[in-house]
Amino acid sequence: MSASTFPSETRSSRTYFGWQSEKVNFLFGMTAQRAVMCGAAVLVAVCPIAASNISAGVVAWPIAILLALLAFVRIAGRTTDEWFVAAVSFQLLKSRNQHKFAAGAFTPASKTDPAGPKPMDLPGILAPLRILEADTGNSTMAVVHHRYNRTYTAVAKIKFPGIGLVDSARRDQRVAGWGTLLSGLCTEGNPIIRVQALQRIVPESGAALTRWHNDRLAADAPEAAVEITSTLLATSTLSTSQREAYLAFVMDERRAGQAIKGAGGGPAGAAAVLVRHLRALTSSISGADLQVDGWLGPRDLAEVIRTAYDPHSARTLAERRASSNATVIDRDTAGLAPGVDPGVAGPAAAEAKRGSYLHDGADSVTYVVHDWPRNQVFSTALAPLLGEGTHRRAFSLHIEPLGPRVAERQVMRERTARHVAIRMRQRTGQIVPEHEQAALRRAEEQDAERAAGHGLVRFTGFVTVTVTDPDQLEDACAALEADAAAARIELRRLWMAQDVGFSMSSLPLGFGLPKMRW
C-alpha cells in the first residue's frame, strides 16, 4: 500500500487518508491471473464446438467450469485459485515435515568462529539471521544481520506520551513529527530502506513492584500485613497490562556499499555505518515526541524474541532484570545477567497449523490488515485495536520509504493502470464503479503531493493475538476482529502462513513488506 506522509489539513483537527492497494485490476475488475483463467475457460469450452466433436465436451466442459469457478468464486475474500495455491504450498511443506521446528539441544558451534558463541537457532524465515554487536560509545547495540537479504537491523525501545488525552493541536503536531521522520527517509539512495513500528500489549508481570516491596519490607513487619500485601501483589497484575513499543530501522548493505568499505568493510563496517545513520535520525525521532529508552543490546533483543515465543518466561526474565537493578540482591538470581543469550532466543518447539501457530506453550493467530479505513479518519483511529484487553496482542506497522524517482515511477504506473481500467469499462458500455473512480482520484492527489515535494511510502500492517490456553483462542480472535471493525479496519487471517505472519507481526526484526507487484 502507499500513502502520502503528509496528510491534508482541515480547519479543525486533521484527518488522514490517501492509502490504497498496490494491486490494480487488470481487466474488467479482474487481476491478470484471473483474466488468463477466464480466457482459458472460454477457449476450452469452445474447442469441442469448433472441432465439431461434441463428445470431447464431456472432458473439456467440466475443465472450463472448474477454471471459471477458480477465477470468480470467492471464499472469505480470496479467490479459489489463491486458496488452491496456498493449500498446495502448505501441504508440500507438511509432507516434508517442514511445518514443525525443534531447537537442537546441542547446537554445533559456528564454522567460521568455533570459539565464539553458538549461532542462533530460529525457525522458518528467521533461520538466516544472526545478532552482531556494535559499539555506540555508551553501550553495545544489537545489529541483526540477514545474510541472504543483505540487511542490517537495529531496534530501539521507545516511550511515547500518547495522543488520546491531548488537545487536537498537540496531537497533530506529534503526528506531523512522525511524518517528518518518514519524509526525511524518502531521499534518493537512502540506505535506511524500512522502518517497523511494533507495539505489544502483554500482562503486567509485577516483578518490579514485587522487588520494590521486598527491598523495603521491614524485618519487624506484622505477619498479617505481610500476608495481605503479598496476596495483593500476586493478584493485582491479573487484570492489568503493559505496553512495549519498539522501533526497528533496516539498512540495505548494497545501498551503503561505499560507506561500508570506508568503515573497514564486512559486518563490523556495516554496523558502524548503521550506527552513524541512527545518530543522524536522533533529532527527527525526538521531533515526533518519541523518547528512545535505549537501543537494544544482544541480550535485550534476544529477550524480546524469547518472550514472544514463550510468554511463560516473561515473569522470570522480568524478575531477573529487576533483581539486577535492586539494592538487595536475591540469592536465586545473583550472578545472572539480565536478558537472554542469543543462542537460545528462539522457541524450543513450534508447529505451524492451517489457522494458528503453536510455540512453547502458547497459541497465536496472525492477521494482515487487508483494507484500511475508506474514509477520512483522525489520528486516533487505531485506538480500538490497540486498547488494553485480556489477551496478548502485537501490532506491527512496516513502512518502506520511496525515493523521489521510484515514487514518481510508481505513481505514474498506478495512474496509468487505473485510468486504463476505467477507459476499458467506458468503451464497453459498463458503469464505472465509484471505488475505481475514487482510486484514480487518490492516485492523482498522490501525484500532486509528490510533485509538491512530499514523501511517499509503502506500508502494511499485521496483528497477532496470543493465548496460553488453547480454549481461549477463538474468543481472543473474535475480540480482536470486533475491535478491528470498530476501527474500520478489515483484517484477513493468514491461513496456511501463520508461522511467517508471526515473524512479521510479533518480532521487531524488519520483516513484513513483499516486493512491489508491478
Image (cartoon, grey):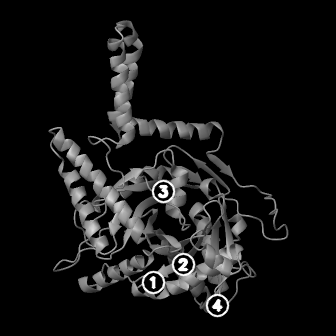
Of circles 1 and 2, the one toward us is 1
Is residue 161 rendered to the left or right of residue 27? Answer: right
Of circles 3 and 1, the one toward us is 3
The answer to the question of whether label 1 and label 2 lie on touching residues, with beta carbons closer than 8 A, is yes
Query: Looking at the rendered structure, which numbered label has been put on residue 138?
Result: 4
Of circles 4 and 3, the one toward us is 3
First along the sequence among labels 1 and 2:
2
Compared with residue 89, is residue 301 higher up or lower down, i.e. above or below?
below
Is residue 216 rendered to the left or right of residue 7? Answer: right
Circle 3 sits on which residue?
514
Circle 2 sits on which residue?
156
Q: Which class describes the residues within 10 Å of circle 2: few (<14), some (14-19), or many (20+)?
A: many
Label 1 secondary element: helix
Give the quadrant of the N terminus. Answer: bottom left
Which kind of residue does numbered mark 2 sit on? Ala
Label 2 secondary element: strand
Separation of marks 1 and 4 at Cα, in angstroms: 19 Å
Is residue 429 rendered to the left or right of residue 14? Answer: left
Circle 1 sits on which residue?
285
Q: Quadrant of residue 31?
A: top left
Which kind of residue does numbered mark 4 sit on? Asn
First along the sequence among labels 4 and 3:
4
Separation of marks 1 and 2 at Cα, in angstroms: 11 Å
Separation of marks 2 and 3 at Cα, in angstroms: 23 Å
Q: Position of residue 492 (x, y in %)?
A: 39, 51
The answer to the question of whether label 1 and label 4 lie on touching residues, with beta carbons closer than 8 A, is no
Label 4 secondary element: loop
Q: Quadrant of residue 276?
A: bottom right
Q: Position of residue 180 (x, y in %)?
A: 37, 81
Which kind of residue does numbered mark 1 sit on? Ile
Q: Which class describes the residues within 10 Å of circle 4: few (<14), some (14-19), or many (20+)?
A: few
The answer to the question of whether label 4 and label 3 lie on touching residues, with beta carbons closer than 8 A, is no
